[in-house]
Amino acid sequence: VVVAVAAALFLVGGAHTTAGASPTAPCGTALPRGARRLPPSLGITNSTAWELSGDNVYVTRETITDDTGDRAVRLVTLALDGHAAPPVWHAVLEAYIPFKVNLDDTGLLTFTARASPTALWGTALPLASRPRPLSAGRHAAEGSGSPGTVGAAGDGAPSNPAVTLIVPVVQSDLDKSYTKSVDVAVRLNSSYQNISIPFSFREADPTGVARIMFELGFEQPQSLDLKRVQLDVWPAADHVDPADLPACCGNPDYPGRAGNATWRAEALGRIDTLRRGRLEVEVTDGSGHPRAGCAVNATMETSAFRFGSAVNRDVWFGKHEGVNASVYRREFLRLFNTAVFEGAMKWPTWAEDAPSHNLTLALVDELIGAGVKIRGHNLVWPTCSGS
C-alpha cells in the first residue's frame, strides 16, 4: 500500500528556541543549539493546530494511545465510490510553520511513524460511521470511538500493510510558486520507525505561509500512525550544514528489492532478447588487410531507450534564487534524453501572459536543439467544471 502525507500548521504562540539546550533527534543524535522549533504544546495530536482535509476521498483521524503508551494520530484514507484514485495531495494533514524562515536556513523535520498494525478490509476500526463533509467536495472525519467496518473481507489487503510515505513536503505558497524545500519518500512497515530529514529552505517566507504537509491520497485505503512530529530551523548565519545532521529515512526495503528476487532473472532475459543485438567490428590496417587480436573500445553516444525527468522552466533559466542553473542544465542533459515540463505547459501557466508563454517556447527550442524529446501536458482534465 502507498500513502502520501502532507501537513499544514496553524500554530500560535511563536517558536520555541533551543539556545540553551542541546536537543536530540529521534535517531539519538545530539543537535546543534540555537534552533527555532515548534512549541511542545502544539504536537501532532492537537487537532486545532493540524488541519485535516480531503477532496474526493474520505480521510479519518483518531487520537490513540498506542501499544507503547504514547499518544499518536491514526490516519485512514478511504476512496469514494464512483471516483477515480485521487492525487496524493487530495488528502492532506497540514500545519503552517509559526515563524519566519529565510533562504538557505537549515531545517530538520523529525517524526515517528508506522503502518497501522490493523487489517484495513473487513475489520472494525474506531472510525466515525460516516465521514462528515467539510465543505463542497471536501470530506473528513474525526474518530469517534464507535466501530465502523472498512471494505469487505477478502479484498486482498494484508493485515500489516507496508506504507510508502511521500513525506514531508515543506512548501511555501509565496507568489503561488509552491516551492518545495524537501519532498522525500520513505518506506514504513508495522513497526515504528524514527524518521529524520535534513534540508535547506529554498525560499524565504516572511509571510507565514510555509507549511509542513503530509499527503495521504492514494489508490488503496491506507492506515498510518504518526507521532513526535518536530521541526528545527537554524538560521543560515549559523552555518549548520544539512549534511552534518542525522538523516534517517525509514526502512528502504520493499518487495522485489533483494538481489535474488525472481523478477530480476526474467528481466535480464528480456534485456538479452529485446535490447541487445550482435555487433561485428572489422579492423584493417592501412592497406586494407584484416588485423586480428586488436583491442576495440566502444562508447554509446545515443540511446533508443527514453530516460526522462520533469524539467522546471524557471530553474532552467536561473529564475530561482539559491539554485545553480548551469549545473541544473548540465546534469539534466547528461542524465536524460526525454523531458516533461513540471508546470509550464499546464493551461493556466501556458496562457498566463506573453512573457511566460515565450519563456516556455524558448525552453522547448533549447531542449529540441539538444536532442531531447518532449512530452506535453494534457489540456482537458476529467474533473474540470468547464470553467
Image: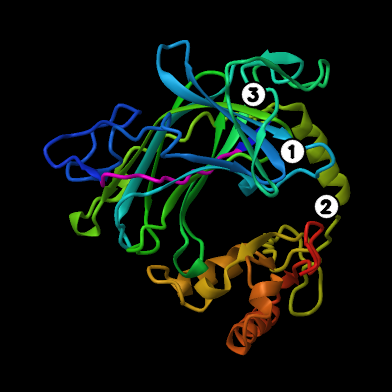
Label at residue 140: none
Hey, what amino acid is under mark 1? Glu
Task: Name the element at disc 1.
Answer: loop
Q: Which residue is mark 1?
A: 219
Report the span colored magenta. 4-14
Residue 323 drawn at (x, y percent): 42, 68
Residue 253 sits above or below residue 87 on the image? above
Residue at the spot x=29%, y=52% of the render?
A: 99
Q: CA distance from mark 3 to mark 1?
A: 21 Å
Which comes before the other along the chain, label 2 or label 3?
Answer: 3
Residue at the spot x=37%, y=32% of the render?
A: 43
Question: Seen in the image, is 139 located left or right of residue 63?
Answer: right
Residue at the spot x=51%, y=79% of the render?
A: 317
Q: Which residue is mark 2?
A: 276
Question: Seen in the image, is 140 located left or right of residue 97?
Answer: right
What secondary structure is the magenta-colored segment mainly?
loop
Residue 287 drawn at (x, y percent): 78, 79
Q: Nearer the viewer, mark 3 or mark 1?
A: 3
Report which quarter residue 286 is drawn in: bottom right
Hey, what amino acid is under mark 3? Ala
Which comes before the other along the chain, label 1 or label 2?
Answer: 1
